Image: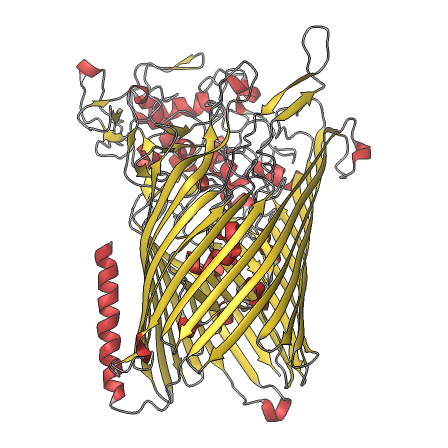
Amino acid sequence: MNVKLRLLSVGVLFFTGQALMAQKKKSDTTTKTKDIEEVVLVGGVKLDPAQKVGSYNTVSKANFESTPFSTVDEVLNGRVAGLNFSSASGDPGSSNMVIIRGVSSLIGTPNPLYVIDGVVLGKGADNAQMMESWNPLASIDPNSIESVSVLKDASATALYGSRGANGVIIIKTKKGKFNQKTKFEFSTETGLQDRAYDKLELMNGDEYIKYGGILMWNSRGMQSGQLTIPTTFGSLADATQYYLDNFIPDTEPIKYNRNYTDWTKQINRKSAVVNTYNFGASGGGENTSFRFGGSYYQNLPLIQAGKFDRISFSSAVDHKASEKLKFGLSASYSNVKRNTYFGGRASANPVTNSIMNSPLRSVFNPDGTYNQAQWGAVTGNDMAYPHPTNNGIETDMSEGFNPVSLLNNSYQKSTINTFLASINMDYQFMKNVSFNSLFGTQAQNMKELQVIGAGHPVYTLMTIPSGKGFLQDARTTIFDWNWSNTFSYRNVFAEKHNLELFAGMEYQNHQYNVLSALSFTANDPRPYFQYTDTQIADSRDYEWTQISYFGRLNYTFENKYTITGQIRRDGNSTLGIEKFGNFWSVGGSWNVKNESFTPALFSTLNFRASYGVLGNIPYADQWGNQYNAYALVNYDSNIGYGGNNGYGYILDPGNPSLTWEEAKHFDVGADIGFFNDRLKFTFDYYNKITDKAIFYARPALETGGPNQYYDNVATISNKGFELVIDATPIQNENFRWSINANGAYSKTMLDKFNYDLYQFRPSDPEAGAGDADNELVALAPGHIFGEYYVVLFAGIAQHDDPTKGIKAGDPLFYTDGSKTDVTNKRTDADPAWMGKSAFPVYNVGITNEFKYKNWSLSFLLSGQFDFYVQNGVHSYTIHDGRFPVRNQINDALYDSWTDAPGAENFGASNPRATVGDPLTGRLESSRFLNKGDHIRLKEMKIAYSFGKLFKESVGINNLTVYLRGTNLLTYVFDKDLDYDPESNSNAWSWLGKGRYWYSSPVLRTVSMGIQIGF
């Protein structure tokens, strides 16, 4: 892959260099140096791009306006070097995982810190109670954004202290301008959506029946429940008829009329629709500027139950009370109404159910009621393989889990109200000395409601005979505020010495309150507890605070040499006895361009380096772990021993010695520009080492006691380099072609660890993995962070080997990592390290924009390389006969070993399917894994601007119409990869990275829009 990056760099350099040299012979009168806006940090500290020391990138407002994406972070995908993106679901509002320069903590979300207009939002962690997932950034209107800056190294992020160890994303919203006539803007966009990447092809009814016949042929003489399959069949047709007679009930009319059910079509809309409407007004006088805006975003995604509506309002006012005193106010409000559904491995997940349900099962019974009964229960036959959850009968669908009925008789509805506001003051009370104060707050109220109709036993405490439904109502209140006060001194001496000094403090307070009530005895579909028999209530209240003192020095000599130093002392209430930590960074840059000896060839030539130590508390932004320093006692009044009710026990031993993680950042970089920066390169190399990483430690175990607590136990290293190329190969009066290409290499290692091996296996293997588990990855010192540690699949046996009990068609597994011997018994094979993880080693993004007169065409290609992804429920999509009446992908028919007459397939990739899958070949192994390498046409847009054509007649300053597509094409390098390579199962832990979890797929959008300015 490094070859690909090298070719990309050399190719762009050669081509653009030749084009620019050719044009230079003409005239550069139309060339203008691109203005780069300063990035404002906490306390009014500004990062001056002309004297750049830290590593950061800025994405402009044009990328966020009228976007079909529901969240800000989705827009950054492919546009920032060193930023890796993946999504938990294509359902709008779902959580995303954004990783900057690798994962540096073992627990907590790997996401960066988000700051909008000075308000510290947190890390986009999922704090929902019932929704499949929730991304707090979905409450922010992307159309209100002016720019987004991504801070990466210690020099750029140090002022955010412990909150910025994963990087910082600063969001600046649009504002008005002083002395500007009021301008009005309106835009709207309408789009249609479908699956961005969909190679998951299920068997249709005919294929399903043919597979059933092959399964019977392969299983001759085997036992299925109390049914013994004949030892011989006269033909494959006889075996197929036997399957129909004994596994498909006579009560199913599809068994005879063959009007098969396409369950995917039954749960999906014919087309998903997304609409956006945006309005803004901005302007200002001599002393006051303003902007007011509003937007409405509506998305009806693929799954019929899904819906996302957001209405939002934003305002910004800046006022100059005098030349020395200035005020600013930014405020926004959004209301989100969202309908979701069960996700993950849940049997009630309509995506999972639509894959597993037999195409021979009808949606409705002949009397018009939903077909809810289990097939075994209908016929009374001992058909299919025994399973403990169904009285010895395994069926295609659990009773009451018809996905169409579930979608129509149960729902998850949520309302999220979010208020963001910041007010700032800047007062120059004496020459060169100023005082800045900023107060920011975020208030978010979520109401989540879940209703499940009677006859759908989604939870184990529900039964069909009871005739009772389920009701849950959860109210979540999140309130955050931060207040910073900073004194600054700025002066220029002798026109050579530019000195800036800052000193300040910041206080943060974060509160999280949940009140929830539920009932398994709902008597009425109306969502009110007066229609239930019994209720269970629960409440949780969390709070944590942080106080910080910081200082910064920035000195520049003759606009050539810059040194900067920052120090911050943070105190955090969630830590042990020592709650404070001291963190710092130093950096410097040399603007060689301003040296007299620098050749005129260079328009930019800047070298920079920085080093710093930042603190981190990885769990702080996720609620439930705010009291780790203390021993916690729990009391349960419902369970007792002997004649006594209730008992108490130690829930968590606590750790009063728990302290900060310390991330040591080293970064060197260079910015090199030619031809008035029409060709510019930005290089960065980084080495980040996180000491005292927090993870689980084991106490001395006692019966009934806690088995783990948090401690500082590990060291993690992140190393990598980044390259950004900006070029304008052609620019004249009528035509302009610009290119932005970014590439990054990143690798994360676990250098030290308190365990020789730590695996993330489910506590109940029979129930399977949950969101907090991942059987395929492990941690060990000296290995790649999150490296796959699995039994290695060795292919399919091509001939019998009586000495090992192997038969042709059996799945084979290497006995260990040496790959010197094989077995057909998966449980006899030892797992081995694969040397790969779910984190891409290489990330690439290339944007091209062409402008010809009033026409423009742009496209963005993104790519991720050298990583593996996993199908989290692979054992269902192709189950090797374990569930004889469940549907599967059509590879089960066309790419599985069989010697059935007329269907022979001896070169298949999948083993011989037999009822019950006695060799358990379907369970966890490297067979689950696929290369995730891919290239995606992330966005393409063609637009025509009428300019000022209508200004005189109707007063319209600008009218632009455009056609846009997102996620248009995806090319994968692994022909067996049938799910989206940018998937993850959750965003609150790195364990979800790269795991497809049967969520709504990532969507492709084709849309049309119009923008009007007057």
Query: In the displayed structure, would residue 306 be above or below residue 852?
Result: above
Residue at x-position 35% and y-position 87%: 732
Query: In the displayed structure, would residue 773 be above or below residue 584?
Result: above
Residue at x-position 77% and y-position 26%: 534
Residue ranking furthest to the right: 530
Q: Nearer the viewer, residue 499 or 157?
A: 499
Residue ranking furthest to the bottom: 952
Pinpoint residue 796: horizontal percent, then vertical percent.
Answer: 24, 29
Observer able to see residue 623: yes
Residue 626 left/right relative to 31: right
Residue 558 left/right relative to 188: left
Residue at x-position 34% and y-position 27%: 756
Q: Nearer the viewer, residue 197 or 766?
A: 766
Q: Nearer the viewer, residue 67 or 654?
A: 654
Pinpoint residue 352: horizontal percent, then vertical percent.
Answer: 50, 37
Q: Nearer the viewer, residue 786 or 435?
A: 435
Residue 769 left/right relative to 82: right
* Placement of the N terminus among the 4 image quadrants: bottom left
